[in-house]
Image (cartoon, rainbow, N blue to C red):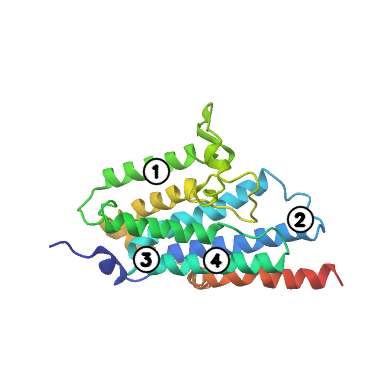
Amino acid sequence: MTQDTSSQHASRPRLRALDALRGFSVLSMVLFHASYDVAYVYQAGFAWFRPPLQDIWRASISWTFLLIAGVMCNYSRDNFRRSGRYLLVAALIFVVTSVAKVDVPISFGIIFCMGASTLLYALLDRLGLTGAREGGSDSVDLCVATLLFVAFLATFKLPQGLVGLGPWQVMLPRAPYESGLLDWAGFPSPTFASGDYYPVIPFSLLYLAGARLGRMLPRHERILSWLESHGCPPLEWVGRHALWIYVLHQPILVGVFTLLFQH
C-alpha cells in the first residue's frame, strides 16, 4: 500500500532554514519595492536602481520564492487548497491595484504564479505524474530537476517571443501573442501591461524543479535534520508570514512615501 507522502512530510517539524531563507528574501523584496517606488513612482532619486542590478536583484527574490515554494509543496497537506488561497489573493491584488492606480495594475504577478504553479503540481500529482507515489532515487530526481531548470532558462524570454539558449534562440510566431487570451501563460498581447509579471511559462518550470528537489530531502536525514534545527527566529517569523507581508507592505510603503515626498 502506498503511503501518503504529503501527510508523512507534514508531520515533521518545519524546515527552519528554508523559513529563514524565505524571510530574508521577503525583506529583500520590501527593500526592492521601496527602491522602485522612490525611483519610479515618486521619482525622488535612486539613479543606481537600474538594470542590470535591478534585474539581478529582482531575480534573486522571485527565483528564491518559487524554488522554496516548490520544495515546500511536498509538505503541504492540501495543495489544491493552498493554490486556491494564492489565486484568491492574486485576484484581490489585481482589483486593489486597479482601483488605487498608484502604478500599473498587477496582472498575473508572483502570487498568481505561486497559485498556478501549486495548482499545476496538484493536478500532476493527482494524475501520478510527479513521482511522489513511487520510491524514486536521487539520480532520477536530480536529472528531472535539472531538465526542468534548463527548460526554464530556455523559455525565459518566451514573453518576448523567443525560445532557446544563448545563440540558439528562435523567434516564435506572433499568433499566440495576438490572441490576447494567453497573457497568463507567457504569451502577452501587444496591449498587455502589468506592474509584476510572472506567467506560467517559464516560471512554473522553476517551481516544479524545486518540487522535484524537495522529493530528495526525506532520503537524506542528516540534511533534513540540519534544515529543521538551524534558522534565525526573526527571519523565520517573516518567512512564515510571507503572504501577509507581501499583501500589506506596498500600501504601507505608499503611505509612508506619500507623507515624505508630497507634503
CA separation, marks 3 and 2?
A: 37 Å
CA separation, marks 4 and 1?
A: 28 Å
- The residue that disc 3 covers is 80
Q: Secondary structure at mark 1?
A: helix
- Identify which amino acid the numbered label 4 is placed on: Ala
- The residue that disc 1 covers is 148
**Residue drawn at the location 54% of the way across and 52% of the way down:** 198
- Identify which amino acid the numbered label 3 is placed on: Phe
Crowding at dot 4, Cα within 10 Å, few <14 / some 14-19 / many 20+, comes out as: some
Disc 3 versus disc 4: nearer the observer: 4
Q: Secondary structure at mark 3?
A: helix
CA separation, marks 1 and 2?
A: 35 Å
Q: Position of residue 108 (x, y in %)?
A: 55, 56
- Which residue extends farthest top? 167
Q: Nearer the viewer, residue 113 or 238?
A: 113
Sequence order check, earlier mark of 3 and 2: 2
- The residue that disc 4 covers is 91
- The residue that disc 2 covers is 40
